[in-house]
Amino acid sequence: MAKTVKSLLCFLSLAVVVTVGQLPRSYVHRKRTTLLTNALESLLAAESHPRCTLIFLTDGSISTTSVFIEFLSLHFPSGMALLEVVLDDQNNIVVQANLSQVVDKVRQLRQVSWCVTVVVLSDDPAFLAAFAEWSLKGRLLVWSTRLLVVTRLPLPELHHLHKLLSMTNSMLFVVDDTLEDTRCSVFIHLPYTISGTKAMKVASWTTHQGLALTTHLPLFPDKFYKFLHKPTLSVAVDQNHIRETEGGTKDDMLNFLAQAINFTYKYVVPPDNSFGSKQTDGSWSGLMGMVVREEAEFSADPLSLSIARAEVVDFTMPLTIQYSRILASRGLPEIDPWGFLFTPLAPLVWVAILATMLMLPVVMFLLSSSFSRNDSKEDNWISTFFSLFRILLQQDYMVSGWWWRRLVFAVWMLMSLVLVKSYAGTLMSVLAVRHIEQPYQTLRDLLDSPSTTMIWHRGSKNVEYIKSVESGIYREVAETESRGGIKYQTLFEFFHSADTLVRRGDHVLIDIEIIISMIVSRDVSKTGRCDFYLSRERLLPSVLALIGQKNSPLVPVISRMVMSITEAGLYYQWIKQRIPNFTTCSFPPTKITVSTSLSVDNLWGMFVLPVTGLTLSALIFCLEIITHRIFPV
């Protein structure tokens, strides 16, 4: 970068001259040139930085070369440059083209310099107007770049510079050399004032008194840190934001910003009531479109940060990081008819019981064979198995034989007693439990249920992403749109869809957690119940921040306020106040207990087992009869 800066400075300090036509230059006396140089030196020395590059830009009507040569003797550490554009009224198109090239050169120098001070010297209103147009169009002046416009024109003839001077870090240096004693006045234009508003004088310079401030403001004041007057700014919001404020909810963050920066505001709502997305023609819709078209200064609703959006607007410091989740309707409490089988004892316990009942008879048969051959003839492993099964079913049994057989049966009786009592106690609780279905916990669950329709936020960053991704699960989500598996809606439409489509059970809504919480909060306040649930899976993290116009000096000021808000924890506190039931339904239970009489709905699964057993035994009985007749003994 250092080599680039040095080469640019060497190139520009050779007094690059873009000549358009050959008009004679106005003659300026040596004395007046010296006075102008002294005035500029006093002004720039008061607010100069050792690393700032000084760039002179003129139309050739003022003899800037002499001023430039005298400034070279001051040995500015970061160098100086002179760019001169000679105007020709008869070829305005060429002038515009060459002026755009000069502005582009200055922007390149600004991008590789630590800081830049641009001094524009001209007495030609057309040149100044063209420079103002191209500097705004070419985004030449960011707030760190200071602009000083030097002219002999009176203030009424400089109205075309109002937008440039009011929205940039600029000052107007008006020279009055008609008298013997040259006088210079320094003016600033306050931001967000209408054209024709009187400029504020902040300093003056005379040959006898030198530079003197006329107000408490310094040179190149930070006009956006806190507005000296109280302008009314247009703030873009969606329709839901309007409804909440009309309903009595305070706009805490916007009020905080308005008080801290000293402005009032008015709401503007986009026609499509969306956050905004890029259209096929390159334009933007929604809140984004209003800020891009400069119909609003900034948006009071946080937007997700994305590369496409960052190219056309400026984002403040992040307010929060949010994940997207699935909002679906909770099922009605249901009875599990097979709960008596699977809930009291885990499947592994049932397997262990069966394995023990199969293993013990074999072991006892082998021991009987070793100790007493007579016992082995009477007690085989099949009879032992049924004996163990009788004990498990709490039936009576007379134990006889060797001591080790009595010990084995005693241990099995104790184990069976613990199992049966545990099963009976748990079963009483299970019969009082109602299960609430929550089937959609992941995107894969939704894709595996083609009858379910997903509702996404129209114009959101998430929608832009799923439409652009070329592989993976989000590509599968995008492909469901062709079969009607996706609907796109605005935030204003979300609340009605949640109350109708999502509650019905065949639709789900996918958006960031804060919006989901707003929907659930409003429903809980209305019904007093948690009729919805949020998925366990979190999707697509989003950085939320406010947006402002590209290169707007208001954005860094708002960003500084946003940092104060987040560091103090105010944002989440305001969210809790704005969403009263913020966490009420964050983790709704999947099971509930009720106190009611047992009915067939609770117990029909138990009756299925004996009926199934009787049916199988009848079939086996018939099979035995048929077999006996075909193959008599």
Image (cartoon, rainbow, N blue to C red):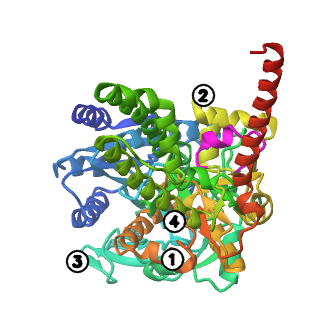
Picture residue at 58% right of the left edge, 41% below the top: 96
Depth order, front residue of 79/141: 141
Picture residue at 23% right of the left edge, 44% below the top: 79
Determine the secondary structure under disc 3: loop
- Rate crowding at label 3 as few (under 14), some (14 to 19) or many (20 or more) other CA atoms within 10 Å: few
Where is the N terminus found, in terms of image quarters? Answer: top left
Q: Is residue 307 magenta?
A: no
Front: mark 4 or 2: 4
Q: Earlier in the sequence, mark 4 or mark 1?
A: 4
Q: Is residue 279 visible?
A: yes
> Residue under circle 1?
576
Front: mark 3 or 2: 2
- Magenta span covers which residues? 441-455
Q: Earlier in the sequence, mark 3 or mark 4?
A: 3
**Whole-number angstrom distance, CA of label 4 to CA of label 1:** 43 Å
> Where residue 49 sits in the image (x, y, percent)?
22, 57
- Rate crowding at label 1 as few (under 14), some (14 to 19) or many (20 or more) other CA atoms within 10 Å: few
Q: Height in image: 221 above or below 373?
A: below
Front: mark 2 or 1: 1
> Residue under circle 4?
425
Disc ID at residue 208 = 3
Front: mark 4 or 1: 4
Amino acid carrying mark 2 in the image: Glu
> Where residue 159 sits in the image (x, y, percent)?
58, 67
Amino acid carrying mark 1 in the image: Lys
Dividing the picture into quadrants, the one containing residue 442 is top right
Q: Earlier in the sequence, mark 3 or mark 1?
A: 3
**Whole-number angstrom distance, CA of label 3 to CA of label 2:** 72 Å
